[in-house]
Image (spheres, helix red, strand yellow):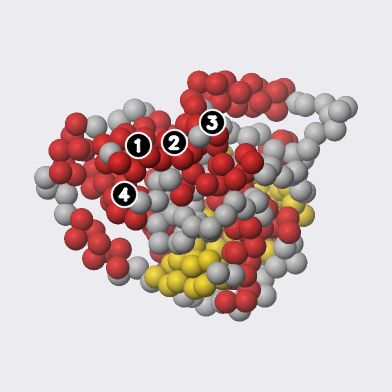
Amino acid sequence: MRRLVERWADGYDWRAREREINELPHFTVDIDGVAVHYLHYRGIGAPLVLTHGWPGSFLEMRLLAAKLADRGFEVVVPSLPGFGFSAQRPGQTDPWSTPQLWHTLMSDVLGHRRYGAHGGDLGAGITTRLAARHPEALIGIHLLAAGAPVLQDDAQLTAGEQAFLEDAARWEADRGAYEHQQRTRPVTLSYGLSDSPVGLLAWLVEKLREWSDSGGDLARRFEDDEILTWVSLYWLTNTIGPSFRPYSDDYARPSKPEPVIVPTALAVFPADLVQEPREWVARRYALQRYTSMPRGGHFAAFEEPEVLADDIMAFFATIE
């Protein structure tokens, strides 16, 4: 933290990073009164919408998006409402509202009758709901995390599923305090993080360090200036508070899981928060591909864009 704070205060060149960001293919469109920002990499292949998670942004997806575009895909990277350059919605929403925005963007705005989707973290939930509600439009979905199924009272769990649920409960108890705070008291938290750049940096760097495949040494995965650009986007747009809204909205208006009949792939990275077993995922999804990745963590699109792009390509090659 001391090293990063000193660099941010003296030596970090935001204007140089700003110029790099401005070179990306940015667009903004109004959808039902919401200003939605997105990157659009045009291509001649299948259209894909990539959805970032928390504490990410479109910056998290840009390396993956560029690699997929180089391989022929048409790639769209929207910013979640309230993140980066997308406007926050004025009132509380339910978990199905953002998937509907994405479907309108891909079908009505960009004119795609069918398209694919990828997401991790919050983006995995959005991608799952998108496929559940619009199966006719989705070629397939590629996920880094899977939503829990609805279990019947007489469901028999495998040993792998039982171990997974125990690991998930242990993770929630030991490291899930941030999530509970963002769900239940988001506004109180946002005052401090919107007032103190050091506080914001600490809140985000903790997650980057613990959730990545860094082994506790953040520099193994992120350059200091990359971290500071990631955090600066939150700071300069004052969007850390709005970024908690998906947590608090889902907590206030939870939804029942719906089955997904769209062809589904899951890529499991060894340093991610949890690793769902194949049989757990297959209870809810039409699972066609399950890949245990050799390295990488929660921010796989940034940590391992080449490996992830290969898996996405291999999956969509089998279902197009």
Identify the mark nearer the N-term, 4 or 3: 3
What residue sits 55% from the left and 21% below the top?
A: 173
Identify the mark nearer the N-term, 4 or 1: 1
What residue sits 60% from the left and 64% below the top?
A: 101
Quarter holding residue 45: bottom right
What residue sits 15% from the left and 44% below the top?
A: 9
Identify the mark nearer the N-term, 2 or 3: 3
Q: Which residue is mark 4?
A: 235
Q: Which residue is mark 1?
A: 192
Q: Which mark is residue 188?
A: 2
Q: Amino acid at mark 1?
A: Gly
Q: Amino acid at mark 2?
A: Thr
Q: Are marks 2 and 1 in contact (CB under 8 Å)?
A: yes
Label 1 sits on a secondary structure element that is helix
Q: Return the residue nearer the eye: 221 or 260.
A: 260
Q: Are marks 2 and 3 in contact (CB under 8 Å)?
A: no
Identify the mark nearer the N-term, 1 or 3: 3
Q: Return the residue nearer the eye: 144 or 34.
A: 34
